[in-house]
Each structure stands twice: as C-alpha cells, then as structure tokens.
Amino acid sequence: MDQIITRFPPSPSGYLHIGGARTALFNWLYARANKGKFVLRIEDTDKARSTKESVAAILESLEWLGIDWDEGPYFQSERADIHKEYIEKLIDKGHAYYCNCSPEEVDAMREKAKALGKKPMYNGKCRDLGLPKSENSVVRLKTPFTGATIVDDVVKGSTSFQNSEIDDFIIQRSDGSAMYNLAVVVDDITMGINNIIRGDDHLINTPKQILIYNALGAELPVFGHVPMVLGSDKSRLSKRHGAMSVGEYKKMGYLADAMLNYLVRLGWSHGDQEFFTRNDLIEKFSLKSLGRSPSMFDINKLINLNSKHIQSSSPDSLAEKLIPILNENGINAQNDQFIQGAIKTLQPRSKTLVDMAQSIAFYFNDNVEFDEKIKQKNLKPDTIGTLEKLADYIEQIDDFNQENLENAFKKVMDETQLKFGKIAQPVRVAITGTNVSPGIFEMILALGQNKTIDRIRKAIELI
C-alpha cells in the first residue's frame, strides 16, 4: 500500500478556528496512525485577504496543539509557475480552451438559461473555436455533456453529480492566475496527496476537482467530507456559541491535549470512550469511525474534559504551562518542588490553567490578602490562643509530614476541646485570606513549615 499522505491547506485570511483545527487534526491523526506524511500548505492566493499576521497565528496555533507537519509550509502563491504549466498541458491535450467572452456576455447567457427554466451557466460558446490567448481571455475546462461524476466518499458514501449541470468552468483568470479548484488539484497531485479529509462545505467543489484529475490523467485521492460543527442551537458555529480562535482557548487556560481530545470527538468516536490521550488518538483513529451527522459545539463538555486532563497531567508539565500565566500576573515562579506541590493541591478542583493561576496565588504572596468580611468572622480575639498553640506545635515538628501535622491539630483539639472545623477554619483564613482552599493538611504541607508558622503569627498580630 502507498504511504498515506494527507494535508491541511488553511487560507490565511484570519485566525485558526475550531472547524479548521478539527480538519487539521483529522488529517494529522490519519497520517500519524498510519505512519504516513502530513503536509502543511498555505493557500494564500487571495492577496486582498491574506496576511502575514494570519499565517503566523495559524502556525502558532498548530504548534500549540502539537500538530506538526512533515513537509511545508508551502505557499500556494509561490507555485504560480507550476499551475500555469499544468494549465498549458490541459490546453495542449484539448481538455481546456481560451475563452474571450466578457463577463456581461456570460451574465446574459445565464439569464437566458434561467428564463428557459434551465440552470444558469456558461453555454460553451468558445469551446470549439480554438481561440489563441488574448489580453482578456480566461481558460475554461471542457466538461462532459453527459453522464455523471461520482464522488466516492469514505464518510458520506457515493454522491452523484450530473455533468450536464456542470458548465465549462474557469481554471485560469484573465490575469494568468489559477482558479482555486485548479490550484488545489495541481498542488495535491504534485505533493503526492492521496487522502483528503475536509469539511462537507467543500463537497460542491469536489466534482469539478475530479474532472480536473481526470483531464490530467491523475489518480484520484481518497475523499472524506466531514459534517460541519454547529452551535448548540444547530445553527452555523459562531462566537456567540463560545467558539473562538484556537489561540483564544490557549489564553483562557485550556490544555492543548484537552483541545485535541474535544476536537476529535466533534465527529469521531471510539465506542463510548470520551477521554483520550494524544497517544490514544494516534493508536485508535480511523476514517471508518468518522460520523455522518453534524456535531454540536458544547463549551461545558470542553471545560469538563479540560479539568480531567489537568487532573491526569503531571505537576511538572502543568508547571511549565502555568508559569508564563503567573509571570504575566506579576508572580515570579520557577518549576521547582514548591510550585509542583502547590499544583498537586489544586489539580482536583481546577477547570483551567487560569483558574489554577488565580487559586495558586496565595502560595506565592508574601503578605496575605484578606477578604475583610471573612477575616472579621473568623479571626477574632478568642481565636488567638488556639492559633498560638497550633503555631507552636507545628514549629516543634521535626519531620514535617501529614501524620505529624495531624497530631499537632489533635493536641490543640484536646487542649481546647474544640472540634476540628473550629480550628481549621481560622487557620485556613490566616494562611490564605479566604475561607475556600484545598484540604487544610495538603495545603499546609505544600506551603511549608516556615511559611505556615509565619502566616499564622502574622494573623495573630493582625487580630
């Protein structure tokens, strides 16, 4: 079997969005699952809309997701000579011709056909005239008058398009530049692309592209057109559904592996399994499991998956991703045992890295920032004695572990006859400034013996 070669060809007229990222992921996974090749091609022939900023943003988003490419990025705008070469081949073989009909003439043809109840299309006026190239001429492909062009699709099955409803479409503009369908086919042929997975909004282009493949005598690739991603109200996905550029999700604190996990589940399944690691996906991905029905974007499912990926990640890997967020917020942190210990206490309850960054801040602040109402309610004069006893017992611990820490609390409980909660809550407020935190023992162990004692005693002074 030939090596599987897939591609992702974004148009750099904006950022990489959910639908495009999913398309890239499907092609990348299929190549990786089959030890194939994944090609990145930037389709930047629309000069008015293509920008270097968009190219940079797309590359950055793919790199963040970990979708790497084996070849490229190729730029379609740099391949104009190759496109012209293939157009000349089609003309020389009699499969294409020059047409000098003006746009007004073509509009008139379409209106006439429409008036007769036919599909509005070019009537082939220049098809057999053998016209030479002229200043305003375009090149059109000769399409069959009869029969049908069949799109054999691994997702949708077979779809038939009547050739009589496909006019001799333009493959080269009057300025010499190739039209989209011609450029795509030539690029895919010359790059050896043999599997094309894309959104089903491209299905309308596929019969025209197949006709170009046939005219060039080239073997057809495997096509797979996946249904679009819709919003929760089943309308086209947009920002109001929570769908933003991939880069925005990174800023919001989502993990790349969680995004991959969520994106792949928008149209692909493996039994009832919901949680996948990157290696799981590469091992299990196949085109046979791509769905035929549109998928619904659900931000709550993404949040849920992200929290699960945070829980299953190592503190070390989370620290690497968390530190830049902390630095942006004025917290100078490095990847050491202290931050990893703090992360462990927050993994079970963090939905995003931004959540974690907000929750972890108290570990790094030299001065505790108190919620005034919570402070007044919990740090009262009658708690001073309890806090002093606990600080003393914690200071006396030689081996600072959970068992010895629990014993320190038990001693205070025995001496004061207070229940655990009556001791733990003032301590929690003294250490964090608020009444919500990780478990008291795991938090104190992560904070460290000296910092814990220091904060308790500062709270005593404050009272």
Image (tube, helix red, strand yellow):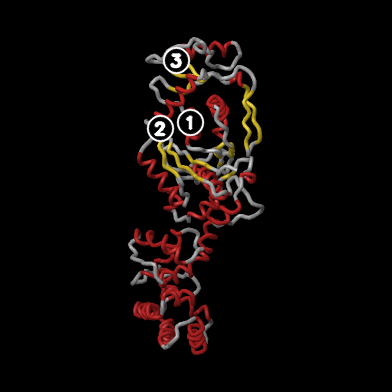
**Left or right, 123 with reference to 249:** right
Q: Residue at x 49, y 84 (%)?
A: 409
Left or right of residue 306, residue 293 in this image:
right
- Whether residues under marks 1 and 2 lie with C-beta atoms below 8 angstroms apart, the answer is yes
Q: Is residue 338 above or below residue 171?
A: below
Amino acid at the residue labelled 1: Val
Distance between the Cα atoms at labels 1 and 2? 10 Å
On residue 301, the disc is none
Q: Residue at x 37, y 15 (%)?
A: 135
Task: Read off the residue under disc 2.
Answer: 79
Per the rendering, the mark at residue 186 is 1
Res. 364 visible in picture: yes
State the SS at label 3. helix
**Residue shown at the point (53%, 13%) measured from the top left:** 124
Q: Quadrant of the C terminus?
A: bottom left
Where in the figure is residue 156, as x and y percent of width and height? 64, 36
First reached walking from the N terminus: tag 1 or tag 2: 2
Which is nearer the eye, 273 or 331?
273
What is the three-letter code of the residue carrying label 3? Pro
| Neighbour tally class for label 3: few under 14, some 14-19, many 20 plus, Cα within 10 Å | few
Residue labelled with disc 3: 103
Of residue 330 and residue 119, the one placed in the foreground of this image is 119
Whether residue 463 is visible:
no
Locate residue 42 relative to residue 461 in the image: left or right: right
* Pointer 1 with pointer 3, Cβ within 8 A: no
